Image (cartoon, grey):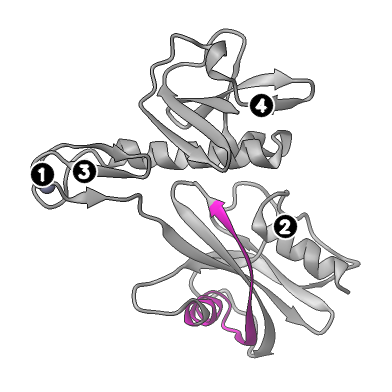
Amino acid sequence: MDRLIIIEGATLAFAECGENLRLPGPEECPEARAAFSFTRGCHSCKVAYMAAPAGMTSLGLREVWPRLDSEEYALAAKGLELANWDRSSRFCPRCGAPVRWHSPISKMCENCSHEYFPQLSPAIIVLIRRGDEALLVHARTFTRPFFGLVAGFVETGETLEECVEREVMEETSLRIKNVRYAGSQAWPYPSNLMIGFTADYAGGELRFADGELTEGGFFDREHLPPLPTPPSIARRLIDEWISNF
Ligand SMILES: [Zn+2]
C-alpha cells in the first residue's frame, strides 16, 4: 500500500483514524511533489517537503508513536531518517559538487560520481541485572521524568560488547559481565540504530561520574519508578526483564 510522508521541519502530517493516527495515501494530497521515494517491505512511500494539508495533524514522531501501529511507525521513521539525511547531505564531501538521488538508498556526486549511502550512528543500550533488581537511570538528556537504561554511542574501533562495558563504566563506575545481545531498533532521531543488550552486575559502587546520568539505582519489580513508554527498546528490555522473573 502506498503512503505519503509529508515533512515540514521536524514534524510529519498524519490523518486522524479514530483515536489513532495514520499516514495519508498519495490520493489524499495530489498536489504533493515527492522529493524522493523509498520502499519498506511491501509498502511504497513518497516523501514531500510541505506544510500539512488542511484536515491533517502536524506532529513530531516521538509525540505520536503510541498512536501509530507498528508498521505505520516504521514507515514514518524510515521516511524521517531518510529526509534528515537528504537535507544534510547535499554536497559531495570529496569534491564539493552537488549530489543527487541515484537509487532509493543512495545519492551520487554530479562531478566525481562517488556514491553515498545514508550513515547510521550505532548506539548501545543495556539492562543490567543484580539479583532480582535492574539498574534504571535518569539521563540529563531525558525530556521527561522517567528512568531508563544506560546507553551510549559506539566509538570507532571497538566491538559492541566493548562499547557496552565502556559506557557502563564511564557513566556508572560499575563492572559488568555476561553481556548478551537482546534486540535492536531503528531510532531516527536523527540517524541511530539502537542495539540492545542485557548484562549482569559484576562489581563496583554506583557513581554517576561523567555527568551524563543525574540519578538512578537498582530497582526490584515491585518498586519501579516511571518507565520509558512503549515501543522504545528501553521499555521492551525492561518489560522482558519484568515478565521473565
Ligand atoms: Zn564529488
Tell me where residue 213 appears, x and y as whole percent: 57, 66
Residue holding disc 1: 96
Residue under circle 3? 108
- Location of residue 34 by image quarter: top left
Amino acid type for the residue under numbered disc 4? Arg
Q: Is residue 117 above or below residue 79?
A: below
The C terminus: image quadrant? bottom right
Q: Secondary structure at mark 4?
A: strand
Labels 4, 3: front one: 3
| Magenta highlight range | 162-186
**Of residues 87 and 37, the one drawn nearer to the viewer in this rendering:** 37
Q: What whole-number distance in Å separates the C-alpha atoms at marks 2 and 1?
A: 42 Å
Callout 3 secondary element: strand
The answer to whether marks 2 and 3 mark residues whose Cβ atoms lie closer than 8 Å is no
Q: Position of residue 219 (x, y in %)?
A: 80, 71
Q: What residue did someone put label 4 on?
A: 22
